[in-house]
């Protein structure tokens, strides 16, 4: 069996173990899974997503960057060149998250996930932001209520632990229990 992948997707929807890895896998989501890609980024995963990418371009990303392909396209999964693909059946976000984490349970260490460490828009790793740096970039109320801010060095957005953070964390915990 080839050592280049951890699992091979089987037409039955299952996975087959090949080799262990110590690094966190990287993913690329197809155009049908934009919401899922943002939520996977919120969980701390490196997920390439661009709604302008064709299936052929996604295959090139797979080959060049050695990412797992996450797709709802059964035709894409059947391409022989894709040896690391995760087929998502559901159209409902919470079910998609559960399905993703169930199908990747052998390649993802749930304890190694770092939620809220990536920009949900551009996938860049977030960096700490000085509080004063955030002052002019966030609403005054937010600045008064929060001491910790992060920024995206690529798209320059500022992030903080808003009231939605607990809801996001709860959904992630339901979808990917320890």
Image: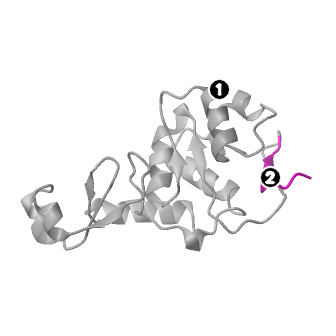
Residue at 37% x, 60% y: name it: 126
Residue at 73% x, 46% y: name it: 84
Image location (x, y in percent) of residue 99: 63, 51
Cα gap from disc 1 to disc 2, whole angstroms: 21 Å
Work out whether 69 lies above or below 140.
above
Picture quarter with the C terminus: bottom right
Residue at 81% x, 48% y: name it: 8
Work out whether 153 lies above or below 60.
below
Residue 36, visible in the rendered structure: yes
140 or 151: nearer the viewer? 151
Residue 88, visible in the rendered structure: no
Q: Is residue 3 magenta?
A: yes
Image location (x, y in percent) of residue 89: 65, 40
Q: Left or right: where does residue 2 sit relative to residue 110?
A: right
Q: Is mark 2 on a helix, strand or loop?
A: loop
**Chain-order first, disc 1 or disc 2:** 2
> Residue beneath label 1, please?
56
Q: Do the residues labelled 1 and 2 touch (CB within 8 Å)?
A: no
Q: Residue 4 carries which label?
A: 2
Q: Is the magenta stretch mostly helix, strand or loop?
A: loop
Image location (x, y in percent) of residue 61: 62, 38
What span is colored magenta in the figure?
1-10
Q: Residue 37 carries which label?
A: none
Q: Classify residue 171 by image quadrant.
A: bottom left
Residue at 78% x, 53% y: name it: 5
Q: Left or right: where does residue 109 sit relative to residue 130?
A: right
Q: What element carries label 1?
A: helix
95 or 153: nearer the viewer? 153
């Amino acid at each position: 069996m080839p050592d280049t992948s951890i699992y091979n997707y089987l037409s039955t929807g299952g996975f087959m173990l090949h080799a262990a890895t110590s690094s966190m896998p990287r993913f690329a989501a197809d155009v049908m899974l934009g919401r899922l890609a943002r939520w996977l980024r919120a969980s701390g995963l490196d997920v390439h997503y661009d709604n302008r990418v064709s299936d052929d371009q996604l295959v090139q990303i797979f080959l060049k960057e050695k990412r797992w392909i996450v797709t709802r396209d059964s035709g894409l999964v059947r391409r022989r060149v894709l040896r690391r693909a995760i087929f998502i059946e559901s159209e409902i976000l919470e079910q998609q998250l559960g399905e993703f984490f169930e199908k990747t349970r052998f390649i993802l260490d749930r304890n190694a996930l770092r939620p809220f460490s990536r920009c949900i828009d551009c996938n860049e790793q977030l960096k700490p932001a000085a509080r004063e740096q955030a002052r002019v970039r966030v609403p005054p109320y937010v600045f008064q209520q929060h001491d910790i801010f992060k920024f995206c060095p690529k798209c320059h957005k500022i992030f903080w632990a808003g009231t939605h953070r607990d809801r996001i964390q709860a959904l992630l915990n339901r979808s990917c229990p320890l």
